[in-house]
Image (cartoon, helix red, strand yellow):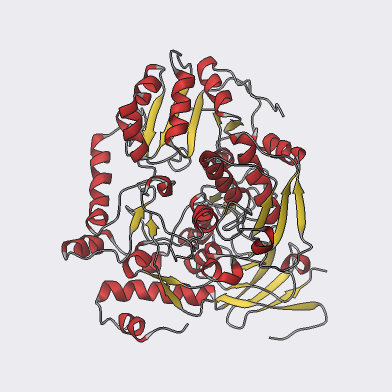
Amino acid sequence: MTSDRNSIILRGRKVIGGIAEGEALVSKKPLMGWGNVNEKLGFTTERNHPLYEVPFKGKVLVFPEPRGSGGFMGYGRTRAFGTNPAAFIYRKGCNLTVFAAMIAKIPTVTDFDLDPLEVIETGDYVIVNGDEGIVEVIKKS
Amino acid sequence: MQLTDEEKRILDGEQGYLAQKCMQFLVAYGEAAGAERLVDIDGTADLHPGMKSSWIPDYHITIEEIEEAAKRGEKFKVPTFANKPIAPGFLVDGWENCGTWPNSDPEYHKKCMRNIQPYIQMGMIPTLSCDYYLVSSYSPTVGQHCSWGESSAIPWANAILGARTNIDGCFQTAYLGKVPAYDMHLSENRIATILVESENELKTDMEYDLFGWAVGEAVGLEVPAIVGIGKPTTSQLVKMNSSLNTGGEVRMYHVPGLTPEAPTLEAAFNNKKTNKRITITRNDLKRVYEMLNYAENDNVDFIFLGCPHYNIQEVQKAARLLEGKRCRTNLWVMTNPWTYKIAEMAGYKAIIERAGGNLLSGTCAGEMRGELPPTAVMATDAAKQNYYITGHAHPKKLQVWYGTTEDCIQAAITGKWRGEWRY
């Protein structure tokens, strides 16, 4: 992976391998499922959520952690409707994020050396190497 | 991941196709989760029976495969209990008069009951509830490895019982009696990481519900050691657990002197010092209360009680509040199928029905998605149900009030929401 002076490298742990890239969509607030992610339209329907109805299709979805029910799986099931993100990046997870990543089958990395929520902002260009657990962040200028 | 020789043989198909398929799931899951090995379940498993008892479509076990296994006389390896059937939103009891479709259709009911029979033949106990742990009559004990699911159940297993589980109960873990050994299965991940102090002793059910949410929101995936809450009842613990795991993702916590892994505060932290501490104040509870009151119109048309499924004491309380009264709104009181039968025997069901309410079992408003009595403004006494229901209703803008059980039943009787912050 190449890196230029505008990019930041994050090293983490692979959850799901593969390589994907795209614009970051960052949620500072945890994400929750069970009817609060619209799988067909690919956005959160959680009331008061900063990303309410903001589509995540094709984005590198960055979030701190999951919260709530096992229905978090809905984030993975977006795959069946083609509305899934290009990759998942999260600070800390549990088996809910693991399952969602396995269902979505998209590059997924967590447990980073740097806090991805501190480094990545919505609109940054992010290259996710799930195989190596390496994420390159090209800051929007 | 390191597999034992026996596990490798299962993966190679020596114990048949179904065991191999289940092991393939456990290996893929364990590797993605960063687990180093599998552990034998010596406690219990919980799964959602019906159409989907697997988490991952690629490893889905079909109903035909389960039927064949049941015919061969195969059994789940460990005591296995049924969470709500995923049908979706299958009402086990009270469906005849629920007034919604498809649950009111006898054919639908028959089909759902038929779909869970192979699981029952394989040994699944049909508790059919999100709080199966309250009625299972058989619980894991301290240190036992389990494979459970469900928001309120996970802290019940980990914190209250001292058993060890992630949120992964499914056909595969129950069938093989094995689960990836990571996260909550390992002692080092169960030690408290943050001290949470309650400014005031908590007394009412609603305070515990709100407190759980405030803590969950503040600590996320951390393991809090909680002090200053008082002496919670069973109902209050269930409510707090449900909210801890909705407002946040608290799988495990300690209350020194109450939960088995923390005889003392020092033990909760395994004698390590921490500087991480927060205090939850009256204002924090009020802030959550206001966030949950997501409504303006005080003309309520639907009251939903029973998230998590009401226990017998809560059904009794609802019945007492409804005795001799008449509801103006639709009122659903949801419980688990076992409690339903006792409530029927005790006459609570008759009291609720005479007041115009419905006693039901096995599912909930959120799980039933669009299949609810017509409603624009509903009310509930559960933070979890309150918060999720507006997402379920999307794109419809559902208004939802939150308050005590008394507030809710009063609203059912009068048709007006009169709940307010009284602390």
Residue at left offset 53%, top offset 56%: A72
The residue closer to the viewer here, A95 or B260, is: B260
Q: Left or right: B171 with respect to B207?
A: left
Q: Left or right: B290 with respect to B175?
A: right
- Residue B160's place in the image compared with A99, above or below, is above
Q: Quadrant of residue B295?
A: top right
The residue closer to the viewer here, A138 or B175, is: B175
Quarter that holds the C terminus of chain B: top right
Residue B397, x across and y down, in percent = 58, 34
Residue at left offset 38%, top offset 25%: B348
Residue at left offset 42%, top offset 60%: B169
The residue closer to the viewer here, A43 or B231, is: B231
Q: Left or right: B389 with respect to B80?
A: right
Residue A133, x across and y down, in percent = 63, 79
Query: What is the tally of numbered marks visible in this picture?
Result: 0
Residue B373 seen: no
Q: Quadrant of residue A16?
A: bottom right
Residue A54, x across and y down, in percent = 65, 52
Residue B304 seen: yes
- Residue A61's place in the image compared with A51, above or below, is below
Residue B189, x across and y down, in percent = 60, 68
The residue closer to the viewer here, A127 or B46, is: B46
- Residue B97's place in the image compared with B145, above or below, is above
